[in-house]
Every structure is written in C-alpha cells, then in structure tokens.
Image (cartoon, rainbow, N blue to C red):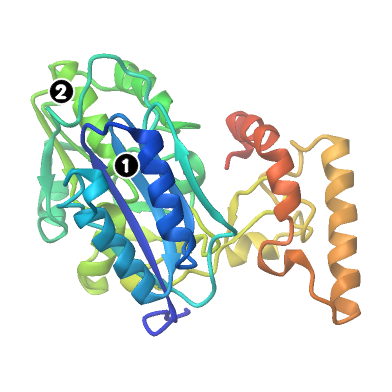
C-alpha cells in the first residue's frame, strides 16, 4: 500500500453547521484567498454553514484554515472549525470551486436544524465499545458506491443512491419503539449530523454519531484494534484511503465512476477506459462509443510520449459533460459525494 505521510500536499476536509449570513460576500472572499495560494478543491456555502475539501501546500492549507477561523469577514462563526487532515502526492483536485447552495449536505427535510439538535458525539476511541453493544443498531449513512469498498463490521447498509434517500430508509427500516439506540457514521461526520437531527425529530431517543467520521477513526485507531473493513471512499483523485489515511489501490471506472479494486480491474468484464463489471450492461451505445474513442486517444498520446489530459483522470472533460447522465446511471445501480 502507498504511504503518503511524507507526501508534499495537505488535504483538509472540514464542515460546520452554523447560521451564515452574506453568503455571496463570503464566497468571493474565500475564492480570492484560496486562489492566490494555489489551493484547489470544493467549498460549499449555505445559510446553514460551510462544507469543503481542499488541497494545497501545507503552508497554504494552514493559512486557509486560520483564515476561516480568524477572518474578520466571517464574524467568528467558523472559529472552532475542526478539519481532518491527510496527505497526497499529487494534486487530487482539478480546480477550485466555491459554490453557493441551499444546504451544505442535501437532505431536503423540513424542520430540522443541526445547529440546535444533533445526536451524541462518540470519539473514535470509544466507537468500538459502542458498536459492540448488542442493542445498538449501526447504520452507514453513505451511498452505495462508498459502502461498496469499505464499512464497519456489522453495520447496516441502507443502499442509498443519494443521501435524500435516508428519509425513506428511516421510515421503512427504523422504528423508535423498537430501535432504542442508533449509531451512525459517514466519511467526515457531516451527513451523520443531519441524519441524527432527522431521527431525533422523528422521535428516536438515543442517537449517536462518530465524531470526525471514518477519516478521524482511520487516523486515530490502530489497525490492530480496528473494526473497519476495507477502504474509505474520498471525493478526490485518491479515490480511497485506508488505516493511517494511506491511499488505497482503488481507481475510478471512467465510464460510471464506480471505485474499482485490483480484483475488479482483473475481471474479464473490465475494459480500461470503457467499462467495468458494475456498468458493462448499463451503458448506452453513445456513451460506450465516446469511451472507446477517448481511450484510443489516451493510448495514442501515451505511445507518442505526449502528455494527455487523462494522465490524472483521463476523462476529465468527458466527466464534466456527462455528470448528469452518470448520476442517472448510478441511481439505477451503476452508482457513483464532499465529506
């Protein structure tokens, strides 16, 4: 496995639920501050808070986090933001995007407010004890393409195509009279905050969530004590990380964006740049034809010793054009978050 503790770039994942005013003003300020320091990634701003994952040199990322905490333009609302840090050998993002949204993580549930009511935070060091208790229902709140490459031992996978489906899962599978204690986890903690707020509003009494998410758990809990199995999907070019936040060996299928293990890439149904075992029967002919041509161009560039935009993702332009179509494919099972 690749060890990136000494890699030259720092990746910071962060979020905070807090009432935010003047989002367009903050958007411009954040964009300008990050851009001049060569920072890339995505930052979402909404009236309910901030959510982002960025990457840059260690100094630039430190400056950015201190700017969020201390910047006068924010009025101190992010002063206690607590990022999760990891490392990358190459820039894992293609560009910087600072976007305005109605929610920093989309659930579309009225009358919930994570700034007022959330579940009980459980530290990574106490998580194993909690999920080992027989009366605790452990729920993975991530999407199916994330749970496919790793989850906690014994956790329930709701089979979510998107986070908004959590409401349907909770109505169908969870009962506050029967399930007295529910423990939830996600990549960095943000989805669990909303999910726990939602369950409490539905009458559940004891709701817990993993503080700092899977990323913090993999950073702090020794591998020989871990209840985690597999890799944790991350929303950048690293694809997945393992214990100690080492980069996993997963790669994204360039057709459907499903994270592929070495075993997946050894499958006879895998054709590099064209299809994988998860999408071979789900791609329309037009999409397949574009993939074949794109891969042909990649191979031509490699044979000539030329740089190709695909060297860091290979289908960047195609991905941007086809994101909407990809999401439709994912919802049918080909499935493809920030934290």
Q: Which residue is mark 2?
A: 200
Which secondary structure, mark 1? strand
Badge count:
2
Which secondary structure, mark 2? helix
Marks 1/2 in contact by CB < 8 Å: the verdict is no
Q: Nearer the viewer, residue 110 or 192?
A: 110
Q: Nearer the viewer, residue 140 or 26?
A: 26
Residue 141: give x, y in percent of width and height. 34, 38
Name the disc covering residue 320, or none.
none
Name the disc covering residue 50, or none.
1
Residue at 12%, 28% (x, y): give it: 116
Camera-side mark, 1 or 2: 1
Label 2: how many Cα within 10 Å (few below 14, some 14–19, many 20+): some
Picture quadrant of residue 85 = bottom left
Residue at 10%, 54% (x, y): give it: 129
45 sits to left or right of 200: right
């Amino acid at each position: 496995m690749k060890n990136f503790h000494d890699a030259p770039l720092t990746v910071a994942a962060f979020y905070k639920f807090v009432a935010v005013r003047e989002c367009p003003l903050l958007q411009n300020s954040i964009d300008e501050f990050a851009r001049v320091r060569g920072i890339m990634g995505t930052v979402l701003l909404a009236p309910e808070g901030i959510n982002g994952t960025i990457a840059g040199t260690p100094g630039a990322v430190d400056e950015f986090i201190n700017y969020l905490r201390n910047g006068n333009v924010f009025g101190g609302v992010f002063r206690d933001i607590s990022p999760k840090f990891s490392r990358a050998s190459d820039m894992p993002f293609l560009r910087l995007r600072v976007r305005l949204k109605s929610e920093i993580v989309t659930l579309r549930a009225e009358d919930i407010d994570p700034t007022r009511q959330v579940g009980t935070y459980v530290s990574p060091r106490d998580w194993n004890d909690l999920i080992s208790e027989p009366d605790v229902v452990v729920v993975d709140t991530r999407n199916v393409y994330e749970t496919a490459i790793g989850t906690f031992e014994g956790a329930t996978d709701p089979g979510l195509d998107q986070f908004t489906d959590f409401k349907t899962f909770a109505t169908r599978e969870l009962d506050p009279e029967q399930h007295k204690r529910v423990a939830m986890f996600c990549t960095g903690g943000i989805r669990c905050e909303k999910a726990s707020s939602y369950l409490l509003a539905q009458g559940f009494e004891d709701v817990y969530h993993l503080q700092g998410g899977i990323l913090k758990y993999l950073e702090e809990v020794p591998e020989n004590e871990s209840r985690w199995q597999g890799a944790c999907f991350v929303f950048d070019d690293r694809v997945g990380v393992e214990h100690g936040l080492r980069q996993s060996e997963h790669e994204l299928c360039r057709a459907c964006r499903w994270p592929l293990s070495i075993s997946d890439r050894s499958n006879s149904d895998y054709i590099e740049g064209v299809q994988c075992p998860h999408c071979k029967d789900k791609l329309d002919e037009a999409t397949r034809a574009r993939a074949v041509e794109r891969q042909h161009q990649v191979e031509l560039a490699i044979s000539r010793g030329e740089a190709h935009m695909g060297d860091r993702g290979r289908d960047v332009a195609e991905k941007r054009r086809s994101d909407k179509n990809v999401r439709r494919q994912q919802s049918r099972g080909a499935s493809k978050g920030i934290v």
